[in-house]
Image (cartoon, rainbow, N blue to C red):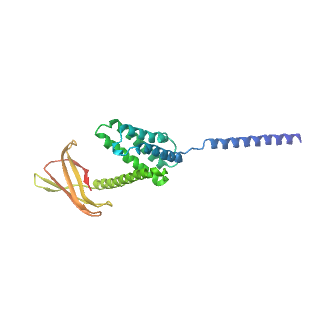
Amino acid sequence: MAKHTRLRGIASVLLALLLIFTLVGCSQKKATKTKYYDKDFISALETGLQNRWEITDSVKDASKASKDILTKSVNAELNAVKTYKDKKFKNDKLHEQVITYLNALEDQKKALKVFDKSSFITTWNKAYNTRTEMILKINSKYKLKVAPKYEDDLTELTRNGDSVAKNDKKAAAIDEIIKTIKFKKTKDDGYNYTYDAKVKNTSNYSFKTFGIKVKLMDSSKTVVSTEPVFTDEWAKGQTNQFEFMTNKKFTSYKVIHDYVN
């Protein structure tokens, strides 16, 4: 009888230990649960944008904003969001957009270092376009909420971002067409050489003018001539002929984008 009592006692102790280990395990799992910052970032972005607009909206003509105002405005936005670059996000695409957006803000800070030079506007606007394109993408999924007095500011950013996105899409389509252009020699009078390329407009765009430049290179990759070539009224799905004439001998060529509208 005593033996059975001892066995029951041992079983009770083992059961109690098993219960403790189970509870500890569950507690550890809860303690190590991953924290995602998607929602936190969206709130921080809304705050950062409004902090920036509070400064910039005090200037009647934004194009005449001083270096001091622009510096304060960029820092006001950046300070609200910069800690999220290395945070964990459940939505990987959002994290990519966050990183691109933060880099654009840093690029605007760098641009301010050359505020008094001609390169400032180009550098600033390039960063601005990237920033607004990311805000457009983020806003399309998360619907940023700002105070009524700042709704026009947000609309201005998303409109610019939409324009940038459309231009990027068109530029990508143009690049794809350029990749298909292959010239062949069609005439040779012993002095002048004519090269033709029949090219189909495989994009969803029609072009009033589609201009390219053909860089002719020798065996050492030195450019011996650059030939401008263009076609007009090029509808989508239509095949047009590109042609250039040269008296230069070359071993390779490169087609680059020139002027398209």
Residue 64 placement: quadrant: top left
Rendering coords of residue 98 (x, y %): 45, 45
Answer with left or right where residue 25 lies relative to residue 13. left
Q: Is residue 221 above or below residue 208?
A: above
Rendering coords of residue 65 (x, y %): 36, 41
Image quarter where the N terminus lies is top right
Q: Residue at x 46, y 54 (%)?
A: 140
Answer with left or right where residue 84 lies relative to residue 117. right
Q: Residue furthest right?
A: 1
Q: Is residue 236 above or below residue 163?
A: below
Q: Residue furthest left?
A: 190
Residue 34 placement: quadrant: top right
Residue 173 placement: quadrant: bottom left
Answer with left or right where residue 178 lies relative to residue 227. right
Rendering coords of residue 243 (x, y %): 19, 56
Front-lying residue, 21 or 30: 30
**Exactly how many numbered labels are in the figure?**
0
Q: Residue at x 66, y 42 (%)?
A: 27
Front-lying residue, 2 or 177: 177
Rendering coords of residue 228 (x, y %): 19, 52
Q: Is residue 214 visible?
A: yes
Q: Is residue 102 above or below residue 175?
A: above
Q: Is residue 85 visible?
A: no
Image quarter where the C terminus lies is bottom left
